[in-house]
Amino acid sequence: MSTEHQQYSTQNQAQTIREYAERRGIRIVKTYSDDAKSGLIIGGRMALQQMIADVESGVAEFSMILVYDVTRWGRFQDTDESAYYEYRCRKAGMQVAYCAEQFENDGSPTSTIVKSVKRAMAGEYSRELSVKVFAGQCRLIELGYRQGGPAGFGLRRALLDERGEVKTELKRGEHKSLQTDRVVLVPGPDEEVRTVRWIYSQFLKKGLSESEIAAELNERGILTDLGRAWTRATVHQILTNEKYIGNNVYNRRSFKLKRKRVANGPEMWIRSEGAFEAIVEPKQFQKAQAIIAARNRRFSDEEMLERLTRLLLRHGYISGLVIDEADGMPSSGAYAHRFGSLLRAYSLVGFTPDRDYRYIEANRLLRQFHGDEIERVIHEITRLGGAVIRNPATDLLTINGEFTASVVVARCRETSSGGLRWKIRFDTGLAPDITIAIRMNRTNTDALDYYLLPQFEMRSKPLGLAEENGLMLDAFRFETLDFFFDMARRVSVSEVTPW
């Protein structure tokens, strides 16, 4: 059930199921309910996953599953997925009955055809709803309202009521509570606004690069809006984001129907010009874009190799990290894409690494991934009504003033025999109540799964994991972090069963 404002509220479903059971003399002994969860993917549907696990493991103390209707398995875009979960339950000996459908789920040709049609209709409903929601969001963007995301350095989010009057300033992690309220961007503290204008001045008038500007900001002790040191990327973001000239831009990236996140071309962006008060002159912004565009023009193979050769002569060695931090250079990803791999590009300029610099590059990506995951944990918990305090020195999270959590990332390593191994290194000095351990996939580019490990599982030596692990560890394994977010939301508002 994804929202209360429809016939599929859990209360309505439960009432229909009770009436069905009473008419047929069935006694309900257990209820599995996924409140406010999307049916597009099974990730996050912890109750559904638990029900299937109970059925297949033989611990279920029932012989029949009562479902409101066919769509409650999920509104999957692949209609076979819904049928697959029902099949797993039936294969384990469970009878499945639909309480609000006009047919008996008896395996007859009629019921088979009707279920197939309804599964397809459920998927189509999600597609149509996605189109409508996107159109509504685009309309709000055109009206000048902000649609999610942090304000950024030098800006703040202001909450407007239905009359367009400012109610309050939203702090980081805070969100509107009324559907009629709207959010806009406003200039932030004067010192931050002056810093943003100083960045543009240094870039345009003095010709400083993003790296040089970041170094000077760090020397002055100025931190970003996230309380971190400045990098080339954070300075570049300020120089390229149109919100600093008051433009409201949306749909740069898409994540529709819970599918793969994609970057959209400028022709697909939704833009409202002059939506907010600008803190940078549009002429300055356009000049900065012209400089960046000229610098980022498409290089020929010969030009790319020439620049790589000069970089090698300057440093004596090259790596993905060195390439990305050098001004005026295409990215390491551009070299890998153009020449097949970084090692191939190295060989073309006569450089043979005395060690595998891909390891350094992977470390950089993992550090960035770790920071992004911490931000996601904070965002999701605050969105659900929880409170999170982050220690800027250790990244230890204190949640609702009740317990602490640490996020660690475990690199995937491949053995000589082709097996995969992970080592989880605990923050024993911090002694968090819960460690969120993220196992990376084979290429160390994305999360494979998550382990929630309470303090009594912590140990001074790293915890070694293989592709298949013991029952105890599997009990704490999850494909998504929704279970942890829900647990964090419930702490302080209801009694929580101890681990």
Image: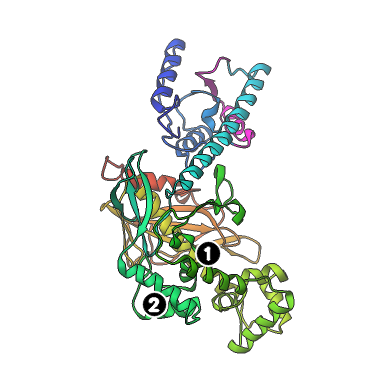
**Farthest residue toward the top?**
23
Of residues 226 and 10, the one nearer the viewer is 226
Of residues 103 and 282, the one nearer the viewer is 282
**The residue stretch that appears in magenta:** 77-103
- Image-quadrant location for residue 408: bottom left
Q: Give the label, 2 or 1, closer to the camera.
A: 2
* Place of residue 471 in the rendered image (x, y in percent of width and height, measured from the top left): 48, 48
Q: State the count of labels.
A: 2
Q: Where the N terminus falls, by quadrant?
A: top left
Q: Are marks 2 and 1 in contact (CB under 8 Å)?
A: no
494 relative to 24, above or below: below
Q: State the residue position of label 1.
A: 411
Amino acid carrying label 2: it is Leu
45 relative to 13, above or below: below
Of residues 130 and 497, the one nearer the viewer is 130
Amino acid carrying label 1: it is Arg
Q: State the residue position of label 2.
A: 217
Whether residue 191 is visible, yes or no, is yes
Q: Residue at x 56, y 42 (%)?
A: 257
Residue 315 forms part of the magenta stretch: no
* Place of residue 239 in the rendered image (x, y in percent of width and height, measured from the top left): 48, 68
Q: Viewed as shown, does residue 480 lie left or right of 302?
A: left
Q: CA distance from mark 2 to mark 1?
A: 32 Å
Task: Specify which label sits upstream in the sequence, 2 or 1.
Answer: 2
Badge 1 density bin: few <14, some 14–19, many ≥20, Cα 10 Å? many
Which element type, helix, strand or loop, lies under badge 2?
helix
Residue 102 forms part of the magenta stretch: yes
Badge 2 density bin: few <14, some 14–19, many ≥20, Cα 10 Å? some
Residue 306: mark: none
Which element type, helix, strand or loop, lies under badge 1?
loop
